[in-house]
Amino acid sequence: MSPRDRNGNARPGSVSPREREGDARPESLPPLERKGDARLEPVSPRDRIRDALTRSQGEQAAIVAYLTAGYPDPERFFPALEDLARVADAVEIGVPFSDPMADGVTIQRSSEQAIGHGVSLRWIFDELARREPDLASPILLMSYLNPLLVFGYDALAERSVECGISGFIVPDLPYEESGPLRAALSQRGLALVQMVTPVTPPERLEALCAASEGFVYAVTRTGITGRAVSLPPEATEYLAQVKAASGLPVCAGFGVRERAQVEAIEKHADGVVVGTALVEVLERGDDPAEFVRSLRPAR
């Protein structure tokens, strides 16, 4: 059988014994299988995100956990990543960047520290390939555009599939300019998640929700991340609008750090994104997986 990447696809250039013997039919083990489907249809990386965050009526809100790559240091990062992937429904790995304009001081500080340790997009791919961590949940990269441009879109998509990445969130990439990256990712079945905010005009909200893949990231407040606030009263109507426009799970983010917030948001969205609070947990040397467990509403 041909060597395969972590999504189950044959690696480019690999040849199976059967293919060497003249049978050109590909060996078609699916990358993943949908539970309960007798046909065992392949599931693309972007659909894996969607499936992980889709909940049935009455189920708890999904949790998307964020951590900065290589933080608090390169060696402790991977155990934290594995632990979070066991308790969260999806995990965002933040690519360190020198000018993280959408992030608050906590994530800026973690990014600066990671860069000081030599962490970069290429480092993330190389270490994921070398270590082959046990990741139970789909993994996304959250990156500003510049590192992706430098890496090259086609190479980025290929390397992502090889390393088990399911999709991307790019906060400084306008929808109107996302075509080239979207095309490269789409060829490999990878998601490009769109972000919406309370001030997104209705027509643009519809377009962004239609274009998003994996899930829709609904920012609950405008501005930078990390502000410790409760769910604003107007957020209920806003999240209802996003849910109505989206055929994908809607996850609300920015400022989530308490169980009470999760309980409030889960009435109006499919999941929550937890970022700054988790970075603070790592900064204190506490257990990030235990913190995520503490956010789960009691049943």
Image (cartoon, helix red, strand yellow):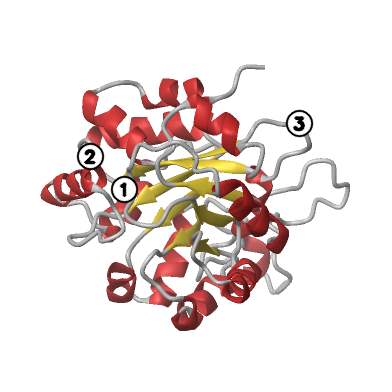
Quarter of the image with the C terminus is: top right
Quarter of the image with the N terminus is: bottom right
Residue at the farthest top position: 299
- The quarter of the picture where residue 57 lies is top right
Answer yes or no: is residue 294 visible: yes
- The quarter of the picture where residue 73 lies is top left
Q: Amino acid at mark 3?
A: Gly
On the image, the x and y values in percent for residue 228 come to 35, 37
Residue at the farthest front position: 233
Decide: few, some or many residues near mark 2? Use Cα within 10 Å; few <14, some 14-19, many ≥20: some
Q: Amino acid at mark 2?
A: Pro
The CA span between labels 3 and 2 is: 39 Å
Q: Which residue is mark 1?
A: 127
Q: Which residue is mark 3?
A: 58
Q: Nearer the viewer, residue 297 or 6?
A: 297
Residue beneath the point at 48% across and 20% down = 294
Q: Nearer the viewer, residue 242 or 96?
A: 242
**Which mark lies nearer to you, 2 or 1?**
2
Residue beneath the point at 60% across and 63% down = 213
Q: Nearer the viewer, residue 194 or 232?
A: 232
Secondary structure of the residue carrying tag 2 is helix
The CA span between labels 1 and 3 is: 39 Å
Q: Earlier in the sequence, mark 3 or mark 2?
A: 3
Q: Which residue is mark 2?
A: 74
Q: Earlier in the sequence, mark 2 or mark 1?
A: 2
Residue beneath the point at 45% across and 60% down = 169
> Is the C-beta separation of discs 3 and 2 under 8 Å?
no
Residue beneath the point at 39% across and 64% down = 171
- The quarter of the picture where residue 297 lies is top right
> Is the C-beta separation of discs 2 and 1 under 8 Å?
yes
